[in-house]
Image (cartoon, rainbow, N blue to C red):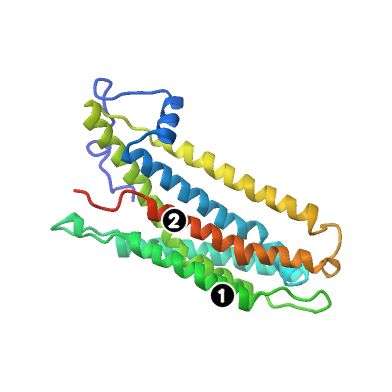
């Protein structure tokens, strides 16, 4: 909260004599190519963030098309479904992150090393999302024939909840991982040079650049789908099953694959809590 840090003690910045300032280009090169533990942690945390951006952007950008083209739901009904999904996603974040904060945010007063580490729970939760989500897609939201009528929006809402709810823990973990990266970077550099440096803004800029790349990849995939498999100028009932199956393939294969990549990035993250 706003009162968690005393701005006159814990949050003071280093003085000119204590700190070392580099150009942003030099810092970016160091983060990308540096050999230290801090640089490795920044790269793996950023890779996980990028894969998670791919994961979430895949279903956020295609959910309306899934309603209309894959499930063959009328656009008016699909709009209601998209609204319900948006509310569900927001509620997952509003409820999930505070819950994880209560479970893992408290420190052990006697020994900080005994405080709860969310890493293992996060890996388990994301594995649950991966497996249960793939099963839910295969059972609940299979493509509907073009000549069949369908108004069931609940199945996709339930499926996305199964995919989304457990992964709120990776959002919480990523917030912590960013702090660990910066802490490791400051301490590692001080051991080497006797000076301090703070480059949170450079690190976040690096992450945002990776996020932009991930978003661009999803946009290009969507454009490719509409240039090869679907025709946005005709009604959903007139689309071929190839169009319906394409979005189904994204949800059945693409979303689980990106979650596998998130799990790998988080597993390779080198800071695992052995600190005092």
Camera-nearest residue between 129 and 65: 129
220 w.r.t. 251: above or below: above
Mark 2 nearby-residue class (10 Å; few <14, some 14–19, many ≥20)? some
Farthest residue to the left: give it. 110
- Image coordinates for residue 81, horizontal then vertical, percent: 66, 69
205 w.r.t. 169: above or below: above
Q: Which residue is mark 2?
A: 264
Q: Is residue 150 visible?
A: yes
Q: Residue at x 79, y 69 (%)?
A: 241
Q: Which residue is mark 1?
A: 135
Q: Is residue 202 left or right of residue 70?
A: left
User: Mark 2 and mark 1: span between their CA atoms?
Assistant: 21 Å
Q: Secondary structure at mark 1?
A: helix
- Image coordinates for residue 124, horizontal then vertical, percent: 40, 67
Q: Secondary structure at mark 2?
A: helix
Q: Residue at x 82, y 74 (%)?
A: 146
Farthest residue to the top: give it. 17
């Amino acid at each position: 909260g706003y009162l968690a840090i005393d701005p006159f003690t814990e949050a003071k910045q280093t003085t000119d004599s204590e700190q070392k300032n580099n150009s942003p280009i030099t810092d970016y090169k160091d983060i990308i190519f540096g050999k230290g533990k801090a640089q490795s942690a920044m790269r793996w945390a950023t890779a996980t963030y990028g894969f998670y951006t791919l994961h979430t952007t895949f279903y956020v950008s295609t959910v309306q098309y899934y309603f209309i083209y894959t499930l063959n739901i009328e656009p008016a009904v699909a709009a209601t479904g998209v609204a319900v999904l948006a509310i569900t996603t927001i509620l997952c974040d509003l409820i999930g992150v505070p819950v994880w904060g209560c479970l893992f945010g408290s420190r052990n007063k006697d020994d900080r090393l005994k405080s709860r580490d969310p890493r293992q729970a996060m890996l388990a939760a994301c594995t649950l999302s991966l497996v249960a989500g793939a099963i839910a897609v295969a059972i609940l939201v299979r493509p509907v024939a073009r000549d069949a009528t369908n108004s069931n929006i609940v199945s996709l809402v339930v499926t996305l909840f199964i995919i989304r709810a457990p992964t709120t823990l990776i959002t919480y973990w990523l917030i912590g991982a960013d702090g660990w990266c910066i802490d490791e970077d400051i301490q590692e550099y001080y051991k080497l040079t006797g000076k301090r440096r703070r480059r949170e803004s450079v690190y976040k800029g690096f992450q945002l650049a990776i996020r932009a790349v991930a978003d661009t990849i999803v946009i290009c995939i969507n454009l490719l789908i509409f240039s090869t498999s679907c025709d946005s100028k005709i009604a959903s009932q007139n689309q071929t099953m190839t169009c319906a199956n394409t979005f189904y393939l994204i949800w059945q294969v693409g979303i689980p694959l990106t979650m596998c990549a998130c799990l790998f990035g988080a597993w390779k993250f080198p800071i695992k809590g052995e600190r005092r």
